[in-house]
Amino acid sequence: MMQIVAEAQRPTLVIDGHHAVISNGRFLHMAHCCWCRNAFHVATDDGTIHMGIAVTGKNPRWYEKETPGGRPEAPAVCPNEACGKEMPRRHYYWYTPSPVYLARDLMNEAWTTIRINHPELSGPADRAAGIIPA
Ligand SMILES: [Zn+2]
């Protein structure tokens, strides 16, 4: 799993006011081998994360939408060496994919920048989210 992450290209972050877009992000998708039940991960590239503060009327709200670049496909054989069985090409249950740490760093940078530049929105958005008392 760490190998997959290390090979990922660095995503790009563009902040426009209280909106941010992270492009070219890698996502890790997890499923279980149908034989040994061990988890395996498959990475997809070119994922996008839209995030920031949406303002509807007088109600600023934090939002975050993560969109992986594609659907994962199970490996031909189980990556667990003790198993190594051929994987059937059937539907796997994929858990919610998560962005790798390169995108996580940029997400933190975006949250911080938006908080600094837009305290008039982040305060109400934090109260709406229950992060700070209403
Ligand atoms: Zn297996």
Image (spheres, grey):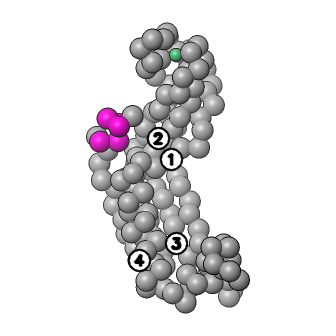
What's drawn in magenta, residue-wise? 2-6
Where's residue 95, x and y in %? Answer: 60, 38
Please give the label number shown on residue 98.
1
**Camera-side residue: 62 or 37?**
37
Q: Residue at x 56, y 15 (%)?
A: 36
Q: Is residue 23 visible?
A: no
Q: Are marks 3 and 2 in contact (CB under 8 Å)?
A: no
- Up-down relation of residue 14 to residue 57 (above or below): above
Magenta highlight on residue 129:
no
Query: Any mark on residue 113, and which?
Result: 4
Q: Is any part of residue 110 visible from this angle? A: yes
Instruction: Determine which quarter of the picture holds residue 131.
Output: bottom right
Type of amino acid under label 1: Ser
Callout in the foreground (4, 3): 4
Q: Within 10 angstroms of label 2, few (less than 14), some, or many (20 or more) residues?
A: many
For mark 4, give the secondary structure.
helix
Q: Which residue is mark 3?
A: 52
**Mark positioned earlier in the residue sequence (2 or 1):** 2
Within 10 Å of disc 1 (Cα), the crowding (few <14, some 14-19, many 20+) is some
Q: Residue at x 63, y 78 (%)?
A: 132
If the image is split into quadrants, where does the C terminus sit? Answer: bottom right
Could you tell whether 9 is left or right of 105 in the image? left
Tell me the crowding category of disc 4: few under 14, some 14 to 19, or many 20 or more residues within 10 angstroms, Cα based.
some
Amino acid of disc 3: Gly
**Is residue 121 placed above or below 75 in the rendered structure?**
below
**Which badge, 3 or 2, is on the more N-terminal residue?**
2
Q: Are marks 2 and 1 in contact (CB under 8 Å)?
A: yes
The majority secondary structure of the magenta stretch comes to: helix
Q: Which residue is mark 2?
A: 28
Of the numbered discs 4 and 2, the one sitting upstream in the chain is: 2
Mark 1 or 3 closer to N-term?
3
Q: Within the image, what quadrant is residue 117 found in?
A: bottom left
